[in-house]
Image (cartoon, rainbow, N blue to C red):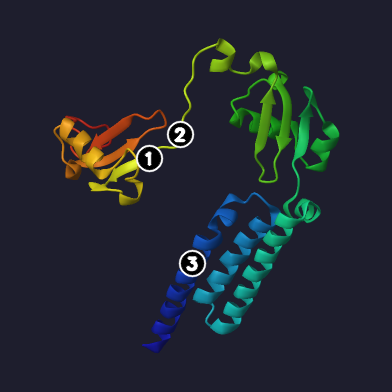
């Protein structure tokens, strides 16, 4: 029985530890925006796998090494935050691939990127004509940032002289039939929410999701959709 309990216990402990670490520094790990964040994500996977399944290795030894890795990563974050010189070497810098509409073949060779690769990255940005591009930069994460030439940039409301209103972040008021208490402040009080529901002959319990969108308009989605033939049938 013990031979089954030990790996199960190690696996559960490793999983809890992984969840805790991702809660603390998950945004840095998941983004893969820098070289050392990518290296950490790969290393964490290896450590967690060994903690859970490699019973020949002592759990505490792996745990100590894992904690040392996290401390090292935190120090790298701290140094890169404080020093631009350190950040340049730890995080890397973007590479300019197109400048003033001209493809920089020297930089393309440095990053080992072919014309086919560049065209694919441009297509992923909905650019099918390289002649439309003024600047293109290959980011450390591997993504491509593009600035189109002026004639090919979509017009904005400011360009067209149209009126535009200031937008704000959406405010979620109801989720799963319950009012989100932390968002019931200012004009969006609990009384205001209940009054809006009453005006629509609804109860809070009838609402699946309610949110004040970026334009300041209340959007409500009920549990009962009243669709005779929904598209997605299980």
The answer to whether residue 37 is above or below residue 131 is below
x and y percentages locating residue 48 in the rendered image: 54, 70
Nearest the eye: 125 or 192: 192
Judge whether residue 83 can be spotted in this image.
yes
The answer to whether 8 appears left or right of 24 in the picture is left
Instruction: Name the residue that disc number 3 marks.
Output: 20
The answer to whether residue 80 is above or below residue 185 is below
Regarding mark 1 in the picture, which secondary structure is present there? strand
Q: Nearer the viewer, mark 1 or mark 3?
A: 1
Instruction: Name the residue that disc number 2 marks.
Output: 168
Q: Earlier in the sequence, mark 1 or mark 3?
A: 3
**Label disc, if present, on residue 171 of the rendered structure:** 1
The answer to whether residue 27 is above or below residue 98 is below
Residue at the spot 16% in from the left edge and 36% down from the top edge: 202
Regarding mark 3 in the picture, which secondary structure is present there? helix
Regarding mark 2 in the picture, which secondary structure is present there? loop
Q: CA distance from mark 1 to mark 3?
A: 28 Å
Judge whether residue 56 can be spotted in this image.
no
Q: CA distance from mark 2 to mark 3?
A: 32 Å
Proximity of marks 2 and 1: CB atoms separated by less than 8 Å: yes
């Amino acid at each position: 029985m013990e031979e089954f309990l030990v790996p199960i216990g190690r696996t559960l402990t490793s999983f809890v530890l992984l969840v805790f670490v991702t809660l603390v520094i998950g945004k840095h790990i998941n983004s893969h925006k820098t070289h050392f964040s990518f290296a950490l994500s790969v290393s964490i996977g290896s450590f967690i796998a060994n903690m859970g399944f490699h019973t020949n290795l002592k759990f505490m030894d792996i745990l100590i090494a894992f904690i040392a890795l996290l401390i090292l990563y935190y120090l790298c974050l701290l140094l890169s935050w404080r020093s631009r010189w350190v950040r340049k070497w730890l995080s890397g810098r973007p590479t300019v691939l197109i400048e003033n509409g001209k493809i920089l073949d020297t930089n393309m060779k440095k990053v080992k990127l072919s014309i086919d690769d560049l065209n694919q990255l441009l297509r992923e940005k909905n650019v099918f004509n390289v002649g439309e591009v003024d600047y293109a930069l290959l980011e450390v994460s591997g993504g491509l940032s593009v600035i189109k030439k002026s004639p090919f940039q979509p017009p904005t409301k400011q360009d067209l002289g149209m009126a535009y209103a200031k937008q704000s972040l959406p405010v979620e008021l109801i989720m799963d039939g319950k009012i989100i208490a932390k968002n019931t402040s200012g004009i969006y009080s609990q009384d205001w929410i209940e009054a809006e529901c009453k005006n629509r002959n609804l109860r809070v319990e009838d609402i699946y999701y309610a949110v004040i969108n970026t334009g300041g308009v209340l959007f409500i989605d009920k549990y009962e959709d009243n669709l005779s033939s929904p598209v997605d049938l299980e």
